[in-house]
Image: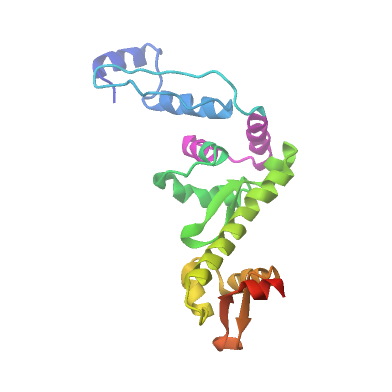
Amino acid sequence: MPRNRRIADALGKCGFIERAGQGSNRIFESCIRESKPLPDFTNTDAWQVSLTFHGQVQDPQFVKFLERIGREIQAPFDTHDFLLLDSIHRHKAAEESLKPRLSRLVELGVLESIGRGRGVQYLLSRRFYASIGKSGEYTRLKGLDRATNKALLLKHIKNISPGGCALEELEQVLPGVSRSFIQNLLRELRDERLISSSGQRRWTRWRLNSNDDEKA
């Protein structure tokens, strides 16, 4: 909102300013497009606006990616989309108010999701990492969710009684993950000789291997 509407109206009629509210959007979009730190309004108070720009380009490859993806998908990005892409590029959590827009960016192939439910995470698409010659980093980031889930299962099995854990109990550890995915993780842990199973079907119990089991 303008501090003095009469001055704002006069400047608008003279052509010195455009529609109110566009300036901040342009500032944020320009910083993100150029891979620069976001504008800093830290010292702004009720009487003055303090704005600091940092001119160092942090990731030139991200700039090229935004340019190329814009040409390929031919879909406009608004300020909220740029803010989301910037947060994910910096490996920061997206603001709650912006999260409903994540699905659109996934559909456009700009982002990819990892996991399900509350544990879902997002990263830039494979094409970004391929374009900067870091496909290995993409694979590492993509696999973090799997490794984390395995660690959670192993921790729970370790802390449970010697009688072992049923699959239904382990599903409570990873509520946003499908049963088949959990079963695959358990098989991997078993192949790594970290856990073992006994029983069949609904009576199967998973328990931590003892040192004697690991030596065998």
Residue at left 44%, top 45%?
Answer: 98
Colour convention of the picture: rainbow
Residue at left 61%, top 74%?
Answer: 210
Q: Give residue 126's position: percent from left, percent from top.
A: 69, 47
- Residue 159 in the image: above or below residue 41: below
Q: Give residue 200's position: percent from left, percent from top.
A: 61, 88
Q: Is residue 67 magenta-colored?
A: yes
In the image, taking residue 115 as reference, residue 159 lies left or right, namely: left
Q: Give residue 42's position: percent from left, percent from top.
A: 36, 24
Which quarter of the rendered picture does the C terminus lie within? bottom right
Task: Please state which of residues 197 and 162 is positioned toward the viewer in this rendering.
Answer: 162
Task: Please state which of residues 209 and 66 is positioned toward the viewer in this rendering.
Answer: 209
- Residue 53 in the image: above or below residue 128: above
Which quarter of the rendered picture does the N terminus lie within? top left
Q: Is residue 186 magenta-colored?
A: no
Residue at left 51%, top 39%?
Answer: 87
In the image, taking residue 153 as reference, residue 39 lies left or right, namely: left
What residue range appears in magenta? 61-85
Secondary structure mainly formed by the magenta segment: helix
- Residue 192 in the image: above or below residue 148: below
Residue 46 placement: quadrant: top left
Residue 23 placement: quadrant: top left
